[in-house]
Each structure stands twice: as structure tokens, then as C-alpha cells.
Amino acid sequence: MTAEREAAGDPAATGQLVEVDDLAISFPAGEGGGEAVRAVDGLSFTLASGRALGIVGESGSGKSTVAAALLDLHRGTGARVTGTVRVGGLDVRAAPEAQLRRLRGGTAAMVFQDPLSSLDPYYAVGDQIAEVHRAHRPEVSRRAARARAVKALERVGIADAARRSRSRPHEFSGGMRQRALIAMALACEPELVIADEPTTALDVTVQAQILDLLHELRAETGMGLILVTHDLGVVAGSVDEVLVMRAGRAVERGPVAEVLGAPRVAYTKELLAAVPRVDAVRERPAAPPAAAPEEPLLEAVGLRREFGRRGARTTAVEDVSLTVRAGETLGLVGESGSGKTTVGRMLVRLLDPTAGTLRYRGRDLGALGERALRPLRGELQMVFQDPVSSLNPRRSIGESVADPLRAAGELDEAGVVRRAEELLERVGLDPAWYHRYPHEFSGGQRQRVGIARALAPAPRLLVCDEPVSALDVTTQAQVLELLGELRRELGLAMIFIAHDLAVVRAVSDRVAVMRAGRIVEEGPVDTVYDGPEHPYTRGLLAAVPVLDPRVAADRRALRAVA
């Protein structure tokens, strides 16, 4: 080891794969002027070769901004970056473009949160992986690169990889697309993989598979890993150390068992307290008694839903029966593709059942035409998973909340605006923001707008379809608390659809577990969670991330044996 190699930042000399020193990143102010936004402020950390670091924090804490800085992805964007970033011995901020191209995908690779945005929809998955390999190994033939792509897909657990390599991204499930992104990242056997929220949109079983895969690849290749996430349960069994960020700064760092088991900083304690626990039995207020106990507010019997054309139809939901009483919350859980969202849409008649009976307050909803159904639409409302796509970007949030009131025609214009402002205030937003647009709000704030809009027609039943799946734990806790308050104060019945079993336990009175379009288990939430009878339910519960690294390791070992 020489002084020259140490001065050059050679990782073989320093023992560090990643070195970040006094990193600061600011973004220019918008068109309205004002001060620049400081996203990262004086951050320093290191990562040794073969080690794994989890970077955690709320949305807006700067963690994804840091991840992008490791590959100098802010270059040319207008961002102001200061400080030192070395990856694999290379000073990425001072490196010329040619060296950066060799770094990206060669020495270090990134797995992004949304594989649909990262994969080109027009090209086969295998061709995209082969392209990465040839970009860094130009001497390799196209045929050899294609063969390497197939091996990469096999390595990440894609069955029948040779055939599936010819598929396009839309032909893969969410979990398969994420595996394909990991295969692409591994195409040139990098020393470091940066995974930015790689499991956020995945259900618990697929999430467990992806995390197990990253653990196996680390053991097999000796690669370093930086895992960026807002989910503390994800890092518990996946990293060696945790770096907790808040407002662009590091507030705590240490071994994962110490940070999660005995946090020193109040903010870390708050994050941990906000995490729903699948093993936590919480006191729930008794649901208000129904006016007619023998008659549920909503009853579905034998629902079936088919999609596709004649001769090539797919059954998404088969023989689903459930009931919901006034003031009660029914949790509906299952993996992606289990049919739970389809059921939710049928319950509010956004989809018509192919077969079965749907009764609301004793009336056969399925027998009602659109004109007869219209007066009941306001009583059956839905909160959608993605408020960005469900809110009109050209209309202010106040107008989006006011539209259902105008449709009902019960108030004059001044009354409509006043009522919309009251609803915004009711969900914790400033009524003065009436004229702001959706892009000016955070994810949690947009979800509150969606809830306010659903409340506008004074519904009796609220179907919440994955309303907190994309939110960080503290924002998630705030939205769940809001829904609980609304239920208690307004006597709302709710159907809460989610793949996060811990969240469902926190909010539900009863739970129905769906698999392949059918309900396989149903009952009081504590009964089902503490003593699941169906093997599928037991498998779901075993896949839920836990905050104890030792328990997480034990569960991973059991999954490997199975």
C-alpha cells in the first residue's frame, strides 16, 4: 500500500468502496424565484467493500438525492453539488464523462424504484440487459451478450429465462420486472449495487423474494449494497449498518441491530414508533351498532368477474361473498393479482360483476341501471391508490373536491366553495390552498385531497384501495389516523384494501384474505392474525418484514429451506 494510492482514493488502499465527505446538494428555485432548495446538507459516510448500508428516512429527507449523487446523475441538471464523492476509488464529481460511463453499470449499478419507467417498453427484456453488457464489453458479440443476459435472468430467479428474455416489460409481473432490473444491474458484475426503494410497490411475498435475492447475490459475489428505503422493516434483515436521514442530514448511524433495537435519537424513535406491527394487538373502538343488525350495510354474494373477449376470457374474481356493517372496517388483503382491487371496484359499481349479487341497504345494486344508481353513487365512494393519476392536474385541489358537490346540485356556488374549504380543513389541509394544483403537494397531502373528495358527497361506505402503500411510515401513520377519526366521527363503514398486513391489522375489525380471485380465510382480525388456519395466510404473515434483525435472518433461513 502506497501513499500515492491512498491519495488517489484507491479502494484497495483505503479499504472503502464508497467515500462521501461533506456532500451538499441544492436545487434551483422554481419560476417564482426565491432561495434554492437544499436537499442534502453536509453528509458524510463510508461503505467498505462487501458491506451493506441502509439509508432510511421520510419522503423529502434527501436519501434518493444522495443515491443519485453516487453516480453523479445530477450532472447537467442545474443542481449545485459540493463536497467529495468517491466510488471504487473514482472521484465521480471530477471524473470526465468517459470514466463516468465506465463507472455506471461497470463498477456501480443502480436499481430504481419503478421498473416500468426504467425499462424500455419497446424492446425485449433480454435485449436491454444484453445492451448494458455490450456497452461495457464492446468486444463481446451480440450472441454472447444475449447468452449472458439469459444467464443473468436465471441468476435472479426468472423461470424459463431463455424464453422470457424475449418478453417485453409489460408481459412481466411487478416482481419479475424488479428482478429484471436487478439482472441488468448485475450484467457487468459491479462492485456496488445501489437499490433505491426496490420493494415499495411490491406485496409482502414478492418483497421478501427480492430482499432474499439481494442477500444471496451479496453472499455469492461479495458486492457492496446501498439500500435506500423509507421502510425500516426492509433494512432490518438486509443491511449491516443503517444511516438515518432527516432534512438532508444524517441524524444517526450505526449497526442495524443497535439503531433499530436501541435508537439514540428522538427522530429515529419516532420513525420506529410509526411502523405498523403485524404482531401488535391494538385496542379498537367498538363499531357503532347497525340500525338493523340482521341487515348488513353492504352484502356481496358469489361475485365473479371475467375479463377479455369471448373464447379468451380470464376469471379475475370467483365466488366472493362478504358483508360490511355500518361503522365497521373490513380489511381485504392478498398478493398482487389476487383480485382485491377488482372486488373493491365491483362493490362501488365501478365494475359490473359478471355474476353474483350485490346488495346495498337491502337494494340489489346489480339490478339498477345507471340512472337509478346515480343517487346512490355519493353513498359509495372510493379512495384510490395513486392520487397523482386520480386528480386532474389542470384543476386546483379545491375544484377537485368541489366537483362532487356541484354534481349533487344541492348548494349554490358560494356554498360549494365554502363546503370544499371545510373538507380540506377536515383532512388537515389549509383551506387557503384551495387554488393550488396537485403538483404543488407531497404524496401524503395529495392522498388527503383524495380523501376530502371522497367525503364530499357524505358517503356511508368508503372503499380505500392501497391508500398508503407509497407513503413513508410517518405520513402513512398520519393518513391512517385521519381515516380512523373519520370513521369514528362520521360512522363510516370502510373496506380497506392493502398488501401490507401490518397496516390492515392496525385499522380493521375483520379481515378477508384473497388468493387467485377467491377468499381463502375470513374472520376477526386478531383471530386470523394470531391463529391463521390457511397455509396461504400463514405464508403471508411469515413474509412480513420485522424490525428485529435476528428474527429477519431466521425467517430468511426458513424460506431458503422451503
Image (spheres, grey):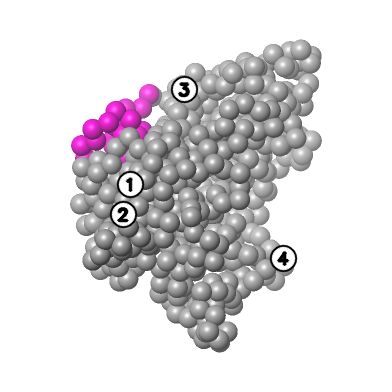
Query: Alpha carbon of mark 1 to alpha carbon of mark 4: how far?
Result: 56 Å
Query: Alpha carbon of mark 1 to alpha carbon of mark 3: how far?
Result: 41 Å
Q: Reading the chain from its start, which is encountered first: label 4 or label 2?
A: 2
Inspect the magenta stretch and tell me whether residue 279 lies in it.
Answer: yes
The residue to which callout 1 is attached is 45
* Residues rendered magenta in the picture: 261-285
Q: Main secondary structure of the magenta part?
A: loop
Q: Reading the chain from its start, which is encountered first: label 4 or label 3?
A: 4
Q: Position of residue 488 (x, y in %)?
A: 46, 21
Quadrant containing the C terminus is bottom left
Query: Alpha carbon of mark 3 to alpha carbon of mark 2: how far?
Result: 44 Å
The residue to which callout 4 is attached is 309
Kindly identify the amino acid type of the residue bearing the numbered disc 2. Leu
Query: Alpha carbon of mark 4 to alpha carbon of mark 2: how far?
Result: 54 Å
Residue at (48, 53) in percent of width and height: 93
Q: Are marks 3 and 2 in contact (CB under 8 Å)?
A: no
Tell us which disc is closer to us: 4 or 2.
2
The residue to which callout 2 is attached is 47
* Numbered circle sitting on residue 485: 3
Query: Alpha carbon of mark 2 to alpha carbon of mark 1: how far?
Result: 7 Å
Q: Residues within 10 Å of mark 1 (few under 14, many from 20)?
A: some
Tell us which disc is closer to us: 1 or 4.
1
Kindly identify the amino acid type of the residue bearing the numbered disc 4. Arg
Q: Is residue 447 left or right of residue 545?
A: right
Name the residue nearer the viewer: 429 or 454. 429
Name the residue nearer the viewer: 243 or 216. 243
Q: Residues within 10 Å of mark 3 (few under 14, many from 20)?
A: some
Kindly identify the amino acid type of the residue bearing the numbered disc 3. Glu
Kindly identify the amino acid type of the residue bearing the numbered disc 1. Phe
Q: Residues within 10 Å of mark 2 (few under 14, many from 20)?
A: many
